[in-house]
Image (tube, coloured by chain):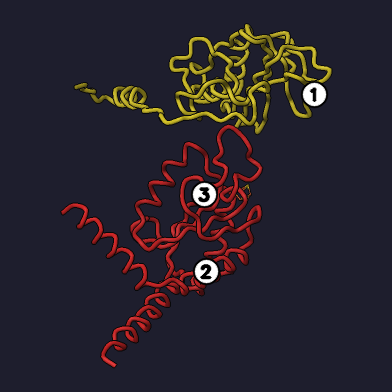
Chain colours: A yellow, B red
Amino acid sequence: MESLIQKFNAVPDKLAVDKCVIIAAEKLIEAVKFLKENSFDVLIDIVGIDYLGMENHNAPRFAVIYCLKSTKNMERLRLKVQIDEGETISTLSEIYPIADWQEREVWDLFGIVFENHRNLKRLLNHVEFEGHPLRKDYPAKKRQWLTENDKMQDQLEARLETLGYKVVSH
Amino acid sequence: MQNEMPGFFAGKLNELVSWGRSHSLWPFPYGTACCAIEFMSTESARYDLSRMGSEYVRFTPRQADVLAVSGTITFKQAPILKRIYEQMAEPKWVISMGACACSGGFYDCYCTVPGIDCIIPVDIYIGGCPSRPEAFFDAMIELQEKIKNESYMQERKKKLKEQWENLKWKA
Ligand code: SF4
């Protein structure tokens, strides 16, 4: 954690009770690569937070939190990236493949865009869902008429092709 | 005397069928959330639902009589639940277990069905978050009472009448 603070200008998060540092969005990729080399081998979760309407909050509206774990030292660490509406974060799916789905979830629920993500579409909601339901300004009582589920054909075909099958379209 | 004979026989058959049905209710566990854990404990040795005649939990709707919906049903789940209900053979009953299945519970949000009775008919509701196994037993006994009061012959009569009307309409 100390080396993170020195190397990447990270700031310890005052709100947190565990090990958590706030880091700039541009430094994220480098920092995560550095951490992965230093035994943080599991990306447990990616969490979004919407601070809209929170009292005494004078930071950007959204925060994305990366929960990392080291299975060697049994250590946990969280990286917090603060971004505003309309800003983007670069994807981690090259470093941790699991980030692919976790970022899709965060995009689905909060509308935070991950740059260079190869398949940024809804994970939990129906494909035709409008809006991002965990944003604080999404009306809690709003209901939508949804009928279409995600077909997932594209993912299936991509997976088959990586396994060495040839997908024949008709 | 001759006229009374069928009536006498039908009455007894009715009771026999209702008795048989009410003591061999095979549940289909549609467990989606925490209530399903409570349903498991209802099923297993400590509480032992088989004492009520619900001997087997069937994981295919074709062989089940009671659909025990325990847990939160989201809008994405809803079509699956409806299809499973439709796949069950008649006669079928539905028990809605827990606040979530009955009314959506505290999930008043974008993704939760506000009660499964929006999509399928429900016979017995059980409250609680989660419902205690005792409550499930109570619901089972109530369902058995309900089944005992149902008339197999009346149902049959209604069905035959419907079929007859259909035939007449076609001809
Ligand atoms: S009623 Fe309570 S225990 Fe049951 S599924 Fe809902 S939240 Fe879980």
Q: Depth check: B66 or A8 in front?
A: B66
Spatial distance from mark 3 to mark 2, Cα to Cα?
Answer: 25 Å
* Mark closest to the chain's N terminus, 3 or 2: 2
Q: Residue furthest right?
A: A56
As shown in the figure, which amino acid type bears the numbered disc 1? Leu
Taking the spot 72% from the left edge, 15% from the top edge, the residue there is: A22
Q: Are marks 3 and 1 on the same chain?
A: no
x 46%, y 69%: residue:
B54
Whole-percent x and y of residue B65? 40, 63
Q: Quadrant of residue B124?
A: bottom right
Front-lying residue, B46 or B74 = B74
Question: Dots 3 and 1: beta carbons under 8 Å?
Answer: no
Q: Nearer the viewer, mark 1 or mark 2?
A: 2
What percent of the width, then of the height, locates residue B171? 15, 54
To which chain does the residue with label 1 belong?
A: A
SS for tag 2? helix
Q: Which residue is mark 1?
A: A15
Q: Name which quarter of the figure residue A45 lies in.
A: top right
Asked which secondary structure carries label 1, the reply is loop
Residue sitting at x 63%, y 45%: B105
Residue underneath mark 2: B49
Q: Numbered disc 3: what chain? A: B
In percent of width and height, residue A112 lies at 58, 16
**Subunit ID for the residue under disc 2:** B
Q: Where on the picture, by quarter, is residue B4?
A: bottom left
Toward the viewer: A86 or B128? B128
Indicate left or right for A56 with B57 as reference: right
Residue pointed to by mark 3: B117
